């Protein structure tokens, strides 16, 4: 059976560490590198519900998009959620590996999956570009085309495709045809969307002023939720691991969900 280290390396083969932002924390963050793995649980986040589910379902490893440890903790205690997760995983000998901004940028990663989920065609990288080991163009944002429609109709399509309980959007008065996507909090990339000539931007975690900026720049913008815009990549992660390690039992989390509710 593969080890935690071998699974981590496979993820880096897909989404190289070099694609991660300098401030990010990716790879093995908890557990033993030489631990053999028979079963892995894939989820968006390594939160307490996922840690408990991994133990209950007999997994030796959790693979997530978001990191268990984002900023270095000054202590590991049961007084906060991160500390409780680390203690729980250590007690049950479960490792935690993540691919975060490197998977956002990678070919076939978070934003390619998001673009495909929304049915976009002729998908390409926009904004700042990077190169992976195969010389392929990578980057944070993707853009592609959809059938022309008004902003309200496209917002309804996004809500349906991403299974959102609700979303926020700004209608800038343009029909939707050339759409940019950035899973998670990508509102700061709005000018790259404008420079690429996109009429619409799908992302999450938008601030009030960012919504107004989009309006004044003539870009329809949709805040579809952090969980909803990134969670589709989990199925791709699971599929990658099954293909790379045929003997590995790969599970998708059945417990993890967006905690945000709408009235």
Image (cartoon, helix red, strand yellow):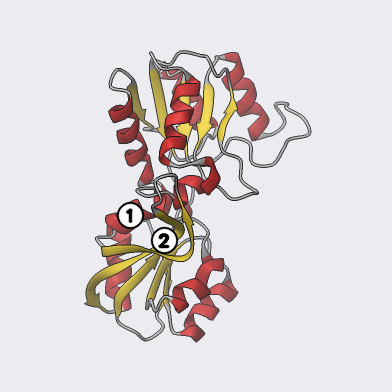
Q: Are the residues at dot 1 and dot 2 in contact (C-beta closer than 8 Å)?
A: yes
Callout 1 environment at 10 Å: few (<14), some (14 to 19), or many (20+)? some
Instruction: Report the front residue among 153 and 74.
Output: 74
Is residue 113 left or right of 67 when viewed as pictured?
left
Q: Quadrant of the N terminus?
A: top left
Is residue 225 shown above or below 217? above
Q: Position of residue 60 (x, y in %)?
A: 46, 18
Instruction: Report the front residue among 252 and 29.
Output: 29
Is residue 33 left or right of 224 when viewed as pictured?
right
Measure the alpha-carbon separation of dots 1 and 2.
8 Å
Is residue 9 shown above or below 140? above
Instruction: Report the front residue among 123 and 158.
Output: 123
Is residue 234 left or right of 89 when viewed as pictured?
left
Q: Residue at x 23, y 77 (%)?
A: 148
Q: Position of residue 66 (x, y in %)?
A: 52, 41
Can residue 33 be seen here?
Answer: yes
- Badge 2 marks a residue whose secondary structure is loop
Callout 2 environment at 10 Å: few (<14), some (14 to 19), or many (20+)? many
Is residue 79 shown above or below 182? above
Can residue 263 be seen here?
Answer: no
Q: Quadrant of the C terminus?
A: bottom left
Is residue 235 shown above or below 37? below
Please name the residue that numbered disc 2 is placed on.
Answer: 224
Residue lying furthest left:
147
Q: Residue at x 48, y 82 (%)?
A: 215
Please name the residue that numbered disc 1 is placed on.
Answer: 162
Q: Position of residue 20 (x, y in %)?
A: 55, 47
Q: Residue at x 49, y 72 (%)?
A: 192
Q: Quadrant of residue 37?
A: top left
């Amino acid at each position: 059976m593969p080890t935690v280290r071998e699974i981590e390396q496979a993820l880096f083969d897909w989404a190289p560490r070099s694609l991660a932002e300098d401030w990010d924390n990716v790879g093995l963050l908890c557990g033993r590198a030489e631990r053999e793995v028979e079963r892995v649980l894939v989820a968006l986040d390594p939160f307490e519900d996922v840690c408990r589910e991994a133990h209950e379902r007999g997994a030796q490893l959790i693979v997530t998009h978001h990191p268990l440890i984002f900023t270095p903790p000054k202590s590991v205690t049961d007084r906060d959620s991160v500390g409780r997760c680390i203690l729980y995983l250590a007690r049950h000998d479960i490792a935690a590996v993540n691919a975060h901004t490197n998977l956002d940028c990678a070919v076939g990663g978070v934003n390619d999956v998001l673009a495909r989920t929304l049915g976009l065609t002729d998908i390409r990288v926009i904004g700042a570009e990077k190169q992976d080991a195969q010389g392929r163009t990578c980057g944070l944002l993707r853009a592609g085309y959809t059938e022309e429609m008004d902003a309200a109709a496209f917002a309804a399509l996004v809500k349906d495709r991403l299974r959102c309980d609700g979303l926020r959007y700004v209608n800038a008065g343009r029909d939707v045809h050339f759409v940019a996507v950035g899973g998670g909090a990508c509102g700061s990339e709005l000018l790259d969307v404008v420079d690429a000539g996109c009429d619409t931007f799908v992302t999450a975690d938008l601030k009030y002023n960012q919504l107004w900026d989009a309006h004044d720049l003539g870009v329809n913008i949709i805040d579809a939720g952090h969980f909803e815009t990134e969670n589709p990549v989990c199925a791709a992660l699971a599929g990658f691991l099954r293909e790379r390690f045929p003997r590995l039992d790969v599970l998708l989390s059945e417990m993890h969900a967006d905690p945000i509710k709408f009235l």
